[in-house]
């Protein structure tokens, strides 16, 4: 079946006791067991699993083409749990443009967890090869990346990493499984911040790890989730399941609008550079065409005149909301350097936009209007 159809039906089997079409939310924290702890329904306590979260996990595994998925309380919780599941002494190679708090984890927590990290530009196959060490267990990348929309060739990274005995994790939050399925391109693990497009309405937080095949690290990951506790709540799992139903449709429209906006911004004199993988001028355009079915709803652009001009543009918007996060139905824009703080590597004149479901003409008018007042 096609992705759109699976997005509507995965994990949506009718409730056997009522026939309800929308799944029930099971809020129970505990499930009746036998006198010696026998679990007739395979359920015991909410921190291990619950029926609503299990539905979400089945749906996510299906949509990503993985064997199994685990849902977490947040995207960062999912990623942190995965890293904590690696054997102590492991070395991790990260792409240099990744979600900033994963850089914070590497800096602040890796020494405590007995892990080491390198950051490399993965658009350079040679740089990745040079960074691999004998203890490298994992290569971690984000494509398209946050906030520069760098595109990394998943197939090529996977073949280099696998030759060195390392696994590959792709943070696929920007593309979603609607546009890119890393497991089918050779990656071993996908991370999703379901807070973003999968939830889709800026009203729920969650994360997930989906794996091609369960291995020792995955067994450990289940233990980390249960014992360290970053498990998804039933209500949040339900909201994310609901978001999945319209994912394909939302992302298709958001991608079309983002491409139109990127093309328009590229022609504006107050814009120094537009970062959007769908533009012919983007260095990753050919790879993006190969591994994505459309280019996603996130773009960023650099305003001519530096940081002050970028902040002025942000202040002149009337429709697009100045706010962090992404993937909702409303368009959001932020000055990434301000929101990431002192350790940010975002260019000072860069604005990142998450394109919502408003009409492209209204968004164009708002952006062009703000830029016209900047120059
Ligand atoms: C938001 C985000 C995360 C972190 O997810 P949370 O749900 O906020 O914890 C990780 N990776 C990417 C690419 C993100 O955009």
Image: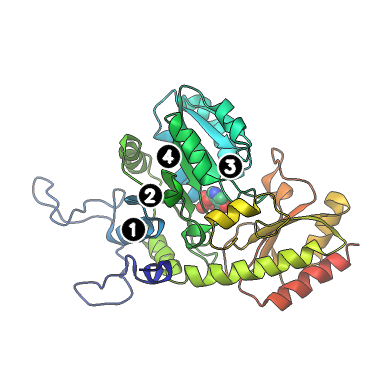
Which marked residue is nearer to the observer: mark 1 or mark 4? 4
Give the left or right position of residue 23, taking residue 341 as reference.
left
The quadrant holding residue 253 is bottom right
Residue 49 image point, x, y percent: 29, 52
Give the left or right position of residue 169, taking residue 224 as reference.
right
Query: Residue at the spot x=50%, y=57% of the render?
Result: 180
Query: Residue at the spot x=24%, y=55% of the render?
Result: 30
The quadrant of the rendering that contains the C terminus is bottom right
Q: Is residue 135 above or below residue 230?
A: above
Q: CA distance from mark 1 to mark 4?
A: 18 Å
Which marked residue is nearer to the observer: mark 4 or mark 3? 4
Q: CA distance from mark 1 to mark 2?
A: 9 Å
Q: Which label number is shown at residue 53?
A: 1
Q: Which residue is mark 3?
A: 101
Q: Is residue 219 above or below residue 175?
A: above
Q: Which label number is shown at residue 191?
A: none
Q: Which label number is shown at residue 231?
A: 2
Asked if disc 1 and disc 4 are in contact, CB closer than 8 Å, the reply is no
């Amino acid at each position: 079946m096609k992705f759109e159809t699976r997005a509507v039906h995965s994990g949506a089997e009718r409730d056997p006791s009522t026939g309800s079409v929308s799944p029930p939310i099971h809020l129970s924290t505990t499930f009746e067991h036998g006198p010696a702890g026998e679990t007739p329904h395979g359920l015991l306590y909410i921190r291990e699993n619950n029926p609503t979260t299990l539905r979400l996990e089945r749906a996510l595994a299906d949509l990503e083409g993985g064997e199994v998925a685990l849902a977490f309380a947040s995207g960062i919780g999912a990623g942190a749990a995965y890293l904590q599941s690696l054997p102590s002494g492991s070395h991790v190679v990260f792409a240099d443009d990744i979600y900033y708090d994963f850089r914070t984890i590497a800096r602040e927590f890796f020494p405590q967890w007995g892990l080491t990290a390198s950051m490399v530009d993965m658009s350079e196959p040679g740089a990745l090869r040079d960074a691999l060490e004998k203890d490298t267990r994992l290569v971690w990348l984000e494509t398209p990346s946050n906030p520069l929309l760098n595109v990394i060739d998943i197939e090529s990274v996977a073949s280099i990493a696998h030759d060195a005995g390392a696994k590959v994790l792709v943070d696929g939050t920007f593309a979603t499984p609607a546009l890119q399925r890393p497991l089918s391109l050779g990656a071993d693990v996908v991370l999703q911040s379901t807070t973003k497009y999968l939830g889709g309405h800026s009203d729920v937080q969650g994360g997930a790890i989906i794996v091609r095949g369960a291995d020792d690290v995955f067994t450990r990951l289940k233990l980390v989730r249960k014992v360290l506790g970053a498990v998804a709540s039933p209500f949040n799992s339900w909201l994310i399941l609901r978001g999945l139903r319209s994912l394909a449709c939302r992302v298709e429209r958001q991608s079309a609008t983002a491409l139109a906006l990127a093309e328009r911004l590229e022609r504006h004199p107050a814009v120094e550079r537009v970062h959007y993988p769908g533009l012919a001028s983007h260095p990753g355009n050919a790879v993006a065409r190969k591994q994505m079915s459309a280019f996603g709803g996130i773009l960023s652009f650099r305003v001519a005149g530096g940081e002050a001009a970028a902040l002025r543009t942000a202040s002149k918007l009337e429709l697009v909301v100045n706010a962090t996060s992404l993937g909702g139905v409303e368009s959001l824009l932020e000055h990434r350097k301000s929101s990431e703080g002192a350790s940010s590597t975002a260019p000072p004149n860069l604005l990142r936009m998450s394109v919502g479901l408003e009409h492209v003409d209204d968004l164009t008018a708002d952006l062009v209007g703000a830029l016209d007042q900047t120059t």
